[in-house]
Image (tube, helix red, strand yellow):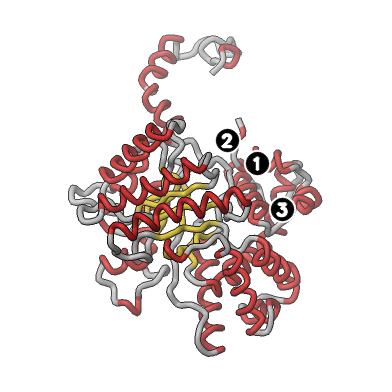
Amino acid sequence: MSAAADPATTSGTASATAFRPEDYAALDEALAETDELLARAYPGDDGSRQPVHTVYVPADKYEPSLPGAWGTEALAAVEQAGGMEALCRNLGFDDRLTSRIASKASAKLGAEPVEDLRLDFEDGYGHRPDDEEDADAVRAGRLVAEAVQAGTAPPFVGIRFKCFEADTRRRGLRTLDLFVSTLAEAGSLPDGLVLTLPKVSTAAQVEAMVAACRRLESAHGLDEGRLRFEVQMETPQLILAADGTVPVAQLLHRGAGRITALHYGTYDYSDALQIAAQYQSMEHPAADYAKEVMQVAVAGTGVRLSDGSTNIIPAGSDEQKQQAWQLHARLVRRHLERGYYQGWDMHPAQLPTRFLATYAFYRQGWEAAARRLHNYVHQVASEVMDEPATARALARFAHRGLLCGAVSAAELDSDVGISEAELFALAHPKAAH
């Protein structure tokens, strides 16, 4: 608080006040630790792009051409089903919405079908002889480096290595080491590099990952803090520990600012709770409870959230494909409505509904959000009395829609009457200052 605005030093119309300058100073001192905590641990979202999905592929199956091949296969699946507009109708979209999103989804599948790619050395890869996994880790690093240099890599790319439980800890660390070391030797690390630590059950495992990142940074001359990582929430021990605490909240503040996201693991978490296989789902009540705890834990920290996956893929008969597409689109919409802006995709044929459902979410909400945002920014009286908190929510919605391609900068200008920079400042005021 500046001296000009300090109520302890500014004269007013009141003849006497209860608080003296030393009272304000005492309160500042008493709350200094709280002020520091809020500034350090709760910086808010930085407003950078968050991928709408993550695609997992076995690490040994990766080739730089894989994202494009997935896009081609996705488009072929849609064509076999009658085309993108027919798929939109099957999903229940009206003609007006279809005209706005069908071509966008087709173009997306042709240009950038995979936003975030994870080369999997964990469940999708399994247990192999050490020399085989060593070779695949080096190969993965080399091919990712080549794809980045050629400009063909997805915006976000990295690996999921084996977890830090006793049986797999050393193997996971060695794979991480070989992959990062190969990337570092090939040149600078990709801006969109993502490392995924799975099956975390204690905050101590996160602290071990922080130490591993520091060792790799030191070995390769990287800036401190350059290596960051995601945490997969797949164990009930993260939701409720043996001592009654909530480790998923603790680990965020023991990750030295390196944790970028929490990813919910649908099937490992469900299995740990002994939920029957046919009822394991992203929308099971147990899943919703876990994700609500995660959502509260990350609030204000800037750590992103990702929902899990569905293993019901568009395959088999035409009817089975249509039902799988309807399920996938509904689940995507469901987690978007609940504030989860990312999920996992397991098959190329899930990509069309990933993008259609995402674009539909923003397009269907755009007119009302743009109108309310316009009225708030330009101080136009309306039937909704938005305050700063709701204005931020409206602005974040618009900003995410802009980043994912659902709405355009031209629409922002015509419908809201502000620039992209002004939208960013309204959506993410902490990051803008």
Q: Label 2 vs label 3: CA separation?
A: 22 Å
- Three-letter code, disc 3: Ala
Quote the CA–CA distance across marks 2 and 1. 9 Å
Contact, CB < 8 Å: mark 2 with mark 1?
Answer: yes
> Helix, strand, or loop for circle 2?
helix
Q: Amino acid at mark 1?
A: Phe
Q: Where residue 23 appears, x then y in whole percent? A: 41, 13
Q: Position of residue 316 (x, y in %)?
A: 50, 87
- Left or right of 280, for residue 330: right
Q: Residue furthest right?
A: 414
Tag nearer the camera, 3 or 1: 1
Q: Amino acid at mark 2?
A: Ala
Q: Quadrant of residue 271?
A: bottom left
Q: Secondary structure at mark 1?
A: helix
Mark 3 or 1 closer to N-term? 3
> Which one is in front in this view, the residue at disc 2 or the one at disc 3?
2
The image shows residue 401, relative to residue 216, as above or below, that is below
Q: Quadrant of residue 431?
A: top right
Q: Earlier in the sequence, mark 2 or mark 1?
A: 1
Q: Which residue is mark 1?
A: 424
Marker disc for residue 431? 2
- Residue 356: x and y in percent read 63, 69
- Which residue corresponds to the image point at 44% horizontal and 46% vertical from the top-left? 182
In front of the other: 283 or 349: 349
Q: Position of residue 347 (x, y in %)?
A: 50, 72
Mark toward the start of the polypeptide (2 vs 3): 3
Identify residue for label 3.
Answer: 370
Foreground residue among 117 and 127: 127
Query: CA gap, disc 3 to disc 1?
Result: 14 Å
